Image (spheres, rainbow, N blue to C red):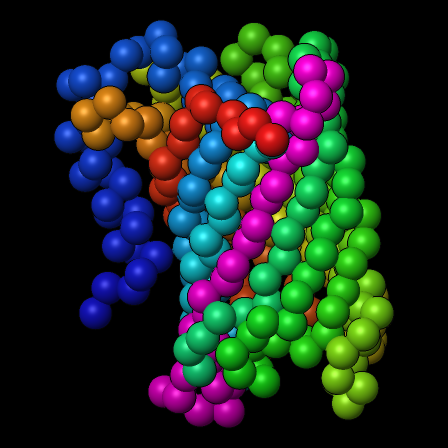
Amino acid sequence: MFSLGLMLVLGMFLVTQVGAAESGASDDAELAKQTQNPVADLISIPFQNNMNFGLEPNHRTQNVLNIQPVIPLNLTQDWNLITRTIMPIIKQPDLRTTSDDTWGIGDINMSLFFSPANSEGFIWGLGPILQFPTGTDEVLSSRKWAAGPAGVGLLMQGSWVVGMVANNLWSYAGNNDRKDVSQFLAQPFINYNLPDAWYLTTSPIITANWEAEGKGNKWTVPVGGGFGKVFRIGKLPFNGNVGAFANVVRPDGAADWPLRGSIGFTSSQIAVL
């Protein structure tokens, strides 16, 4: 039985072939670069599927489908507010067995980036990140309200788009019987854009759980990369990519390697308040 992640990857290639004939190459090449800018004036709705293989002790696989709408708001002529929401739909395996799973929604988080509207050279955004205890099951949720700072910075030069998104969450309320949340995330990204709106990409998600016990159990550091393409179905632009990573640093029992596939609609229209 095909997993949701592999179905997304297969779907990406199929719709690429369908949309290729109607794609405007020059426009799509520029759109590909803009979709790689986390604070661009683009409305997008990506569906990102993450398959995490090799969870110990029974070598189980966790699946996380992130629905990630990005909506930019024009605050003034000089400033935009970029809202980035992540709603995870999780298949969490019971690590004590080889077959039992828990399905449901995890904790939703939202980043709010205040960014200059007409940045040139170094592009940046700063603001808060908020996490809400929306998980539908105890094993899918921290049961904590959390918040912290978030930031993004990048450079776009020729075919290259290079930057980083980072945040840190601390819990401030919630279930007193659950552990406090103190988590760091950094996602560096390097993209090299090719002809016909294809691109090579690496964007490992580096995390640290400051509350984890044991020196070797705080950090997860993946290494890897993949490729993607902007394409059209009719006149509608989509962005799809796929990548594989190896967790060269990971806590005890964590996944050996993740496979990530993403596909999403994007629009050049910015929302106005």
Majority secondary structure of magenta residues: strand
Pick whichever, 223 or 36, lies toward us: 36
* Residue 246: image location, x then y, percent: 54, 53
Vertical placement of residue 123 versus 215, above or below: above
Identify the image quadrant of the N terminus. bottom left
Q: Is residue 268 above or below residue 223?
A: above
The answer to if 143 sits in the magenta stretch is no
Most foreground residue, 138 or 255: 138
Q: Quadrant of the C terminus?
A: top right
Q: Which region of the structure is painted magenta? A: 74-101
Q: Is residue 118 visible?
A: yes
267 versus 62 height, above or below: above
Give the side of residue 86 with respect to residue 58, left or right: right
Say which residue appears at 67% left-offset and 47% top-offset: 111
Residue at 28%, 12% in the rendered image: 24
Q: Position of residue 114 (x, y in %)?
A: 73, 32
| Residue 75 part of the magenta-drawn span | yes
User: Residue at horizontal 56%, vertical 74%?
Assistant: 135
How many numbered callouts?
A: 0
Q: Position of residue 62 (x, y in %)?
A: 46, 70
